[in-house]
Amino acid sequence: MIDPHFEILTPIDGKEILKHIEAVGRTCYKSEDKITEDSCIAFVKNIVKRGHEAVIEHFNITVRLTNDRGVSHEEVRHRIASYAQESTRYCNYSQDKFDNEVSYIDIRGGMELDSKVGNLSTSTFDAIYDEWLQACADAEAHYNKMIQLGATPQIARSVLNNSTKTEICITMNLREWRHFFKLRTSPAAHPQIREIAIPLLQEFQRMIPVVFDDIEVSI
């Protein structure tokens, strides 16, 4: 069992990103003469405030997300993006490189964020969690048995559940990342996608000035 996590693959210099966006955006107004060392901050802030977000499409960021396959099905719904995902067709989890086991994303964090499940009694909560643990163990056992009998990974994967860990590299421009965060940090979003989207947004807000500051999260 592992927790969901992320790795930002694109080198990030927040101030340089704003300068890049300003250089692009001022082409629209032919106001390059107004560029100063710090003018990018006010310029990009105004761009975002006015909703002129086409300008911020001119910078891409790639992130590697490690979450469950159910969550990945929602991530790939974002159209303006590029994806590279760990393949259950070609990855044989019964081999040494995977420690001869299937990795699952721990569901406990998602259960705690679920407005109904998180408020259940401790005994009921634990009983639900134990059922999930058993289902994961059963799936792994059947997967390994199928491989031993001669099944290929692309056939054996059929018994794996949505909690199976996957790594997915996502490249989006800044506008699409804003769209991603607005949808996936919302209380209406699936609790397990919120579990990874919220800390990723917070890291973006820490590293890149202005662009994501207006996106607020309710826990």
Image (tube, helix red, strand yellow):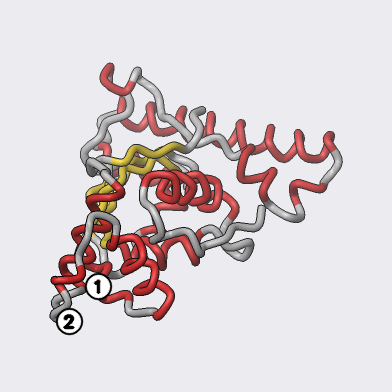
Is 172 in front, or is 110?
172
What residue appears at the point 17 percent right and 77 percent down from the top-left corner? 31
Earlier sequence position, callout 1 versus callout 2:
2
Q: Amino acid at mark 1?
A: Val
What residue appears at the point 28 percent right and 62 percent down from the top-left corner? 39
Within 10 Å of disc 2 (Cα), the crowding (few <14, some 14-19, many 20+) is: few
Above or below 193: residue 76: below
Q: How far across and down, in percent of the image, does residue 136 sit?
A: 53, 34
Above or below 53: residue 61: above
Look at the image and tell me whether residue 78 can be seen. no
Query: Picture quarter containing residue 25?
Result: bottom left
Q: Is residue 106 left or right of residue 87?
A: right
* CA gap, disc 1 and disc 2: 9 Å
Q: Amino acid at mark 2?
A: Cys
Residue 28, numbered label: 2
Q: Is residue 49 left or right of residue 116?
A: left
Above or below 181: residue 62: above
Q: Secondary structure at mark 1?
A: helix
Residue under label 1: 55
Is 188 in front, or is 181?
181
What residue appears at the point 35 percent right and 20 percent down from the top-left corner? 100
Between disc 1 and disc 2, the foreground one is 2
Q: Secondary structure at mark 2?
A: loop
Within 10 Å of disc 1 (Cα), the crowding (few <14, some 14-19, many 20+) is: many
Q: How many marks?
A: 2
Above or below 175: residue 94: above
Q: Contact, CB < 8 Å: mark 1 with mark 2?
A: yes
What residue appears at the point 55 percent right and 35 percent down from the top-left corner? 106
Q: How far across and down, in percent of the image, does residue 192 sit?
A: 55, 49
